Image (cartoon, rainbow, N blue to C red):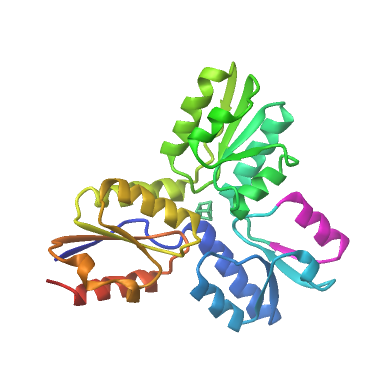
Amino acid sequence: MEIIVAEHAGFCFGVKRSLEMAEEALAKRGHVYCLGELIHNSQVVADLEVKGLRVVSSLDAVPEGAVAMIRAHGAGPAAYEVAQARNITLLDATCPFVRRAQKAAADLAEEGYQVLVVGERDHPEARGIVEHTGGRATVVENPAETDGMELTKRIGIVAQTTQSAKKLGQVVARVIPRARDVKIANTICDATSHRQGAALEIARGVDVMLVIGGRHSANTTRLADLCADICPRTHHIESADEIEADWLTDASRVGITGGASTPVAAIEAVVRRVGTCRN
Ligand code: SF4
């Protein structure tokens, strides 16, 4: 059995950067608050909690004068206002690609466009982008949702950074016939495009595809969905122990990739586990 690991699998630039910031702050201060889970990987977050990271769902839970992190997903303007009012020092790990999406959406709203954000409604990054438009933007999860929406003649479209170009294109295709002025900011991040491209290339030529990453990780779920479109024997797993030997029956080629919050160690563990299931 041949095992092929995708290029661009595992931690992306934004996640690495936020982890380095957290490690450095914890080494210096002993404990630091974080607005939401730093990354969508429970094992990594648990390790950081042992080192002193305290995950909170709101800055209201952070004592005055303390230090709190904004994760790579970013946050809305209210978080910055609360921090200033309560003398909380922010360590801002917002990924520059997320910041670009926030700014693109804010600019479009400012220019009078009705803003659509292609993304996941409950994802913190999408919520943050909407907040940067003063709550005026609407999140579109499925392209068909736009059919029932009231649209003006001026539509601005941005994407949550981890969306697929295919979905962004589908939303654009549905909106164009209904508007006169459509402005699109392709805010999908480079790391996501490269990761998806590399995974799809492998998925085309393997019997089984394993996609590793948190089940609540948007980019991993998207990666698994894209691979499943091409390779029906795709499995989204969080760790190597979930692999069932049956999955690999008669497989001569197995492809492996990991989401942006997946440590190299988790990918290596999957490679080892697949190796022990060789037929
Ligand atoms: S997936 Fe892209 S936008 Fe998100 S943290 Fe990584 S590099 Fe930044």
Q: Position of residue 237 (x, y in %)?
A: 37, 66
Seen at 62% across and 26% down, the residue is 155
Q: Nearer the viewer, residue 107 or 121?
A: 121
Check the picture and name the quadrant holding the N terminus: bottom left
Quarter of the picture containing the C terminus is bottom left
Asked if the stretch drawn in magenta spans residue 89, the answer is: yes
Which of the 4 image quarters holds residue 268?
A: bottom left
Q: Nearer the viewer, residue 248 or 27?
A: 248
Q: Residue furthest right?
A: 85
- Residue 56: x and y, percent? 70, 70
Q: Which portion, as a residue range, is magenta?
A: 76-91
Q: Is residue 198 left or right of residue 69?
A: left
Q: Is residue 239 above or below residue 99?
A: below
Question: Residue 266 magenta-drawn?
Answer: no
Q: Position of residue 235 (x, y in %)?
A: 32, 61
State the residue at coordinates (41%, 62%). Answer: 10
- Is 193 rendered above or below residue 21? above
Quarter-of-image position of residue 49: bottom right
Residue that lies at the very extreme toward the top in this rendered image: 180
Q: Residue, x 26% and y 52% (percent of image)?
A: 232
> How many numbered circles does the render carry?
0
- Say which of 13 and 137 sits in front: 137
Up-down relation of residue 121 to residue 215 (above or below): above
| Residue at 65% from the left image edge and 43% from the top image edge | 102
